[in-house]
Image (cartoon, helix red, strand yellow):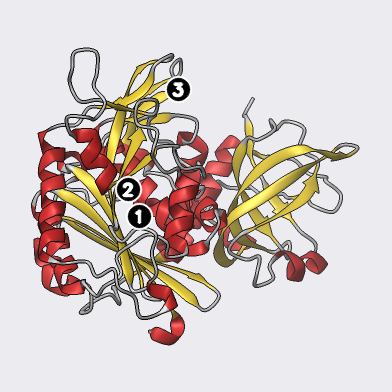
């Protein structure tokens, strides 16, 4: 007997305006449905209809706890507008004599589509909406890949890119809601994941050599834009396009404020040496630069550690040279120029727990200021059992947490306080040349654009 898997849910017309109001459309809504054969917290792809004659959206649906007799709360998220595809159009592309049926939201009546019919329906929708294929496949990937931790060299770079983007979103929004929405919607292409291990729940992220993949390429398309508005004041990306393996631009809005994020990399992910985040806040005329490093796990008891290497020494020296050339002025002439720390250079040590799709939380790591890092690397810094340099959560306690870091940058308590855009452009160029991926996030009000 054919297995039933897919759902087309029909909402009554009087629910449409409420569920799809402007403030809800790109986010989420919930409803109570009768879904007996669906595990709590399980994520599925569903199709939504608001007329009974069209398929209007494809979305993710997550079952919650029971709310009334026979019904459970179901949260719908990551809605992709299909532009009201006619049911008859879809049925015309299915096997002969196949008809689509719905689950009625108001009554809970109606069941799933047979597996064969569901896959044919998704294929038909892709044919009818070719411009939405990547978005549809992203949702399908989330339901498949999110159960596994992704391993491999490319996955290790994407962990760092994910942390950098998440930090930028937290700084910009002042809370974690925007970051949750974006990170929960990320997934790699299914074709790039293989070697699934159902015992360890791990899989391998394997990218083609000619691919131009970054973490930004796996977030919803509504955040993606073609070109960067950050051109001449910080960095002229147009002049660098020819030398870059990958250049991506995303834009996020909150009220009258805009955050534009540019990703640049001269290398394939598996040949990328690390990730840098540069966050520039026009209101405070400051920037913060964070370099990301992965920590290894020694044991369940002793936890994660980072062993400084020659590459880190070179990067610390490069930052020191930059600070020598660009004297940071601690004198202030306005309230917004006041800082608790004028340095602006930090490192985040990130425990390597594997990359996971559709997870909204950042990894609890260690934000270390440049001055504290120099102490940790020096003669009085912590050492391992054999006398080598070693950094752990226990032996290096003066680090900032994710919340402390994003809150301080959001309010302008840490960061540079002088106009260093020309020198900053040179620093971006140097990091790209040595094989690091660079994420530049610029926050400003729309009035400044």
Q: Secondary structure at mark 1?
A: helix
Name the side, left or right, on which 354 lies relative to 105: left
Q: Secondary structure at mark 3?
A: loop
Q: Residue at x 64, y 46 (%)?
A: 61
- The picture quadrant where one finds residue 277 is bottom left
Above or below 193: residue 186:
below
Q: Residue at x 62, y 29 (%)?
A: 2
| Image marks 2 and 1: residues in contact by CB distance under 8 Å | yes
Residue 133 vs residue 309, the one in the foreground: 309
Residue at the disc numbered 3: 201
Above or below 301: residue 248:
below
Q: Earlier in the sequence, mark 2 or mark 1?
A: 2
Residue at the disc numbered 1: 216
Above or below 334: residue 65:
above
Q: Earlier in the sequence, mark 2 or mark 3?
A: 2
Q: Earlier in the sequence, mark 1 or mark 3?
A: 3
Residue at the disc numbered 2: 161
């Amino acid at each position: 007997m054919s297995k039933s898997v897919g759902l087309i849910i029909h909402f009554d017309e009087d629910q449409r305006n409420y569920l799809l109001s402007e403030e809800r459309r790109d986010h989420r809504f919930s409803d109570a449905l009768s879904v007996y054969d669906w595990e709590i917290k399980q994520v599925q792809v569903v199709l939504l209809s608001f007329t009974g004659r069209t398929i209007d959206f494809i979305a993710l649906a997550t079952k919650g706890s029971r709310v009334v007799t026979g019904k459970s709360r179901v949260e719908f998220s990551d809605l992709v507008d299909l532009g009201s595809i006619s049911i008859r159009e879809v049925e015309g592309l299915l096997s002969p004599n196949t008809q689509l049926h719905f689950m009625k939201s108001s009554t809970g009546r109606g069941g799933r589509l047979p597996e064969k019919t569901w896959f044919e329906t998704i294929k038909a929708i892709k044919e009818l909406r070719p411009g939405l294929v990547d978005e549809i496949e992203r949702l399908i990937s989330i339901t498949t890949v999110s159960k596994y931790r992704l391993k491999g060299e490319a996955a290790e770079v994407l962990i760092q890119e994910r942390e950098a983007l998440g930090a930028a979103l937290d700084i910009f929004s002042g809370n974690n809601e925007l970051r949750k929405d974006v990170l929960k919607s990320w997934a790699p292409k299914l074709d790039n994941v293989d070697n699934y291990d159902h015992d360890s729940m791990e899989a391998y992220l394997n990218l083609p050599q000619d691919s131009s993949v970054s973490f930004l390429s796996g977030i919803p398309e509504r955040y993606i834009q073609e070109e960067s508005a950050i051109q001449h004041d910080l960095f002229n990306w147009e002049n660098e396009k020819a030398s870059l393996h990958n250049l991506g631009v995303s834009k996020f809005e909150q009220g009258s404020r805009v955050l534009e994020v540019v990703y640049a990399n001269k290398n394939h992910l598996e040949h990328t040496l690390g990730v840098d985040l540069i966050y520039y806040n026009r209101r405070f005329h400051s920037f913060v630069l964070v370099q990301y490093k992965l920590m290894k796990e020694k044991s369940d008891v002793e936890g994660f550690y980072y062993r400084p290497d020659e590459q880190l020494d070179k990067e610390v020296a490069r930052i020191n040279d930059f600070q020598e050339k660009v004297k940071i002025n601690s004198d202030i002439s306005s309230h917004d120029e006041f800082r608790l720390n004028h340095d602006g250079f930090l490192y985040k040590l990130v425990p390597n727990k594997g990359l996971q799709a559709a997870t909204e939380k950042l990894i609890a790591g260690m934000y270390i200021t440049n001055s504290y890092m120099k102490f940790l690397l020096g003669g009085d810094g912590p050492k391992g059992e054999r006398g080598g340099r070693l950094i752990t959560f226990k032996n290096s306690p003066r680090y900032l947490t994710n919340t402390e870091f994003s809150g301080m940058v959001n309010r302008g308590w840490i960061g540079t306080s002088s106009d260093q855009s020309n020198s900053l452009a040179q620093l971006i160029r140097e990091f790209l040349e040595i094989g690091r991926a660079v994420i530049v996030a610029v926050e400003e009000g729309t009035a400044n654009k």
